[in-house]
Image: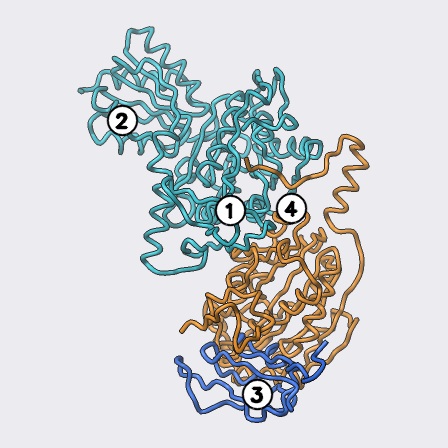
Amino acid sequence: MAKGRVSIVVERCKACGFCVEFCPTHVLALSSAFNSKGYHPPHVVHPDKCSGCDLCGMYCPDFAIFATKVPSPAGGDK
Amino acid sequence: MSGLIPNGLINDVVNPVEPFLRSDRMPHIWCPGCGIGTTVNSFARALIESKIDLQSLALVSGIGCTGRVAGYVKLDSFHTTHGRAIPFATGLKLANPKLNVVVYSGDGDLSAIGGNHLIHAARRNIDLKVICVNNLIYAMTGGQTAPTTPDHSITSTNPYGVFEPSFNLPHLVEAAGAVYVARWTTFHVRQLARSISEAFQKKGFSFLEVISPCPTLYQRRNKLGDGLDTMKYYKEKSRVRHGAPTSEVGLTMTGEIIVGKFVDRDRPDYQTMMRTQYSESLGERFVEPQVETVCS
Amino acid sequence: MKADPRGVLTGVHFMDGDHACCEGALAAGARFAAGYPITPSTEIVERFAARVPTVGGTFIQMEDELAASITLQGAVWGGAKAFTVTSGPGFSLMMEHIGYAAMTETPCVFVDVQRGGPSTGLPTLPAQADMMQARWGSHGDYEIIALCPNSPQECFDLTIKAFNLAEEFRVPVMFMMDEVVGHMTEKVVIPPASQIEVVPRRHTRKPAHEYLPYETNGDMVPEMAHAGEGYQFHVTGLTHDQRGYPNMTPQIQDKLVRRLQNKIREAADRIAMCEEEQLAGAEVVVVSYGITSRVAQRAIEMARERGLRVGKLRLLTAWPFPEKKIRELAARVKAFVVPELNLGQMVREVERAAAGQAKTFAVSHAGGGVHNPEDILKAIVEASRCQA
């Protein structure tokens, strides 16, 4: 069960590759899809490995990706 | 599709940086692989961590790619003239001492045309937090030589290679009097956020240099790869040396990048010294400058 | 609203124009000045530096005029009424920021105590050769207001007017003194604060979520907010729309730049101030301003003693230029005589407005002193003899 979840704002992405490179658990890869500007945005390839650290969000120069922690089932995140 | 996110929500979660952005202006104009946006993430983190009151925060920028930061942040922000963000910020701060004033500008803007103002504000120890995004070039205008461009670099105004020595900005501002001087690269996202937070705790002239890629101009013309290649270079060749003598932190095109907190000292800021001097000289006749109620 | 008594040095004084200008600024509510020393203006900020810490404001001597001219604008956006003072070479350095003030609609006052030029010229001697520069010195299309005092008393009174116009129209106002007016010592009466009208900042009353920094209604002047009040607005020198966001299209450019121009031009009748004397029935009208108007006064008297029908039009406002007045007069007088301490600047405006309906005689002077009344008289006599 993943501790974190990635959200991607596809239309803002310029495919710089920072998020893919610096994700510590290699959750992401550039997809073969295109956004309307012709860039390949990233997509999540290993969702279960996401820790929600949000390094992707901190690196992204385009504010196009971020990760949030998934609240744990019973008890929730404090 | 402008990238507008209703209420900043996507899948019911908000990007921590989104509340600080003018979402209606996204996507921004910076190139793929440019590091300026990355510095804004660190800046936003620092604001969150320092619990800075956003209402009393003002951001002033000059002209250039980094200068465009002012237009993308949801703060009282001023996009001023080339090189003059610091004196404008000085006026803001002196008129309303309660403001937290950040200057966010580029290496060319701050150290070339703005160089005089940089050294005087540091000398005076005006209470400003200056974030200098140093991409080693004049990017906005097409890649001309900046005072920070390393030796032998190819630029549009040195097509045969730069032969001028370049500024070592931490050394310059330390000598001029800055009380807090740190350098990171856009690879050091967390460290940069932490340094910005530290600067917010200090009164006086703080200078944070952030080395950042300009893949379209600087890196491309010098065959140094793209933004990601540059980030990998930062990761590989940066050396954290807190307290390093600033005379030793000069940059070259492909050499080591010394990063860290170089200067953290205390001396009274301009307004404190002003108040002290006036109180001593004028005694009871001294009237504290107030935020003027010039409105009806 | 009435002036803040803390800044008003009520009384009868014997002071020079520079000092009177400083008192005018304080009376108007100015609590911030940024300056750089330059003869013959320096005394204005020297006095301000001494006065303002006892009144509750700030003076900072900046490292150059480039800094001074923008620091004052930062102070305006921080909530203060602010100004700077300079002379020719400094005025030239300030041009970019005068344009920035016009573009961002920052209310402020730039005092130019004119001296001989060009370049370093005559630092301690008068001229009136920056008049066109006041109007056109920065790049692009924009409008400013320029006032010309001719006595220390007017250096007090008109400085207050300058600040009031700046606030009313959200425009940089040029206060065009000259070295003689600045350094001449005369009686200056400063009334009680309750008798001094000051125009407050046109601050918005809208809540933050409704406020657009460059939205305007009828009078083409937007409402202002200051940093630190929660409005979170953006100001830029780039061509911008109502939101203050850069919007660099020909359509927005047209809208913005025309409004910046029209907010002044359409109010020109209200703004323009002239002193008129014996215009009805005049054959010749002497148009003058600043120190030259005082010499011209003597020449006019001498001409009238000879039976010539000479009217006087003294410009207190040089810009916007009182075109309408000149056009009206041109229809019925023979000629205008325009003495100036320059080689022909405001005379061009007179000529342009007269549109050939009356002749124009310039009495130029390269600067460094004032005219002899006889030189102006000679021109008046020649003008009165010319064919209508």
Which of the 4 image quadrants contains residue C39?
top right
Could you confirm whether marks 3 and 4 are on the same chain?
A: no
Establish if B52 lies above or below C280: below
Residues at marks 1 and 4, common chain? no
At 37% across and 32% down in the image, what residue appears?
A: C343
Could you tell me residue C71's position as x and y percent? Answer: 58, 47
Farthest residue, direction front: A74
Give the chain of mark 4.
B
- Residue indicated by mark 4: B96
Secondary structure type for disc 1: helix
Q: Chain of mark 2?
A: C
Residue C240 visible (yes or no)? yes
The residue under label 3 is which amino acid type? Val
- Identify the residue position indicated by label 3 in the image: A20
Disc 4 crowd, CA 10 A, few/some/many (<14, 14-19, 20+): many
Question: Are callouts 1 and 3 both on one chain?
Answer: no
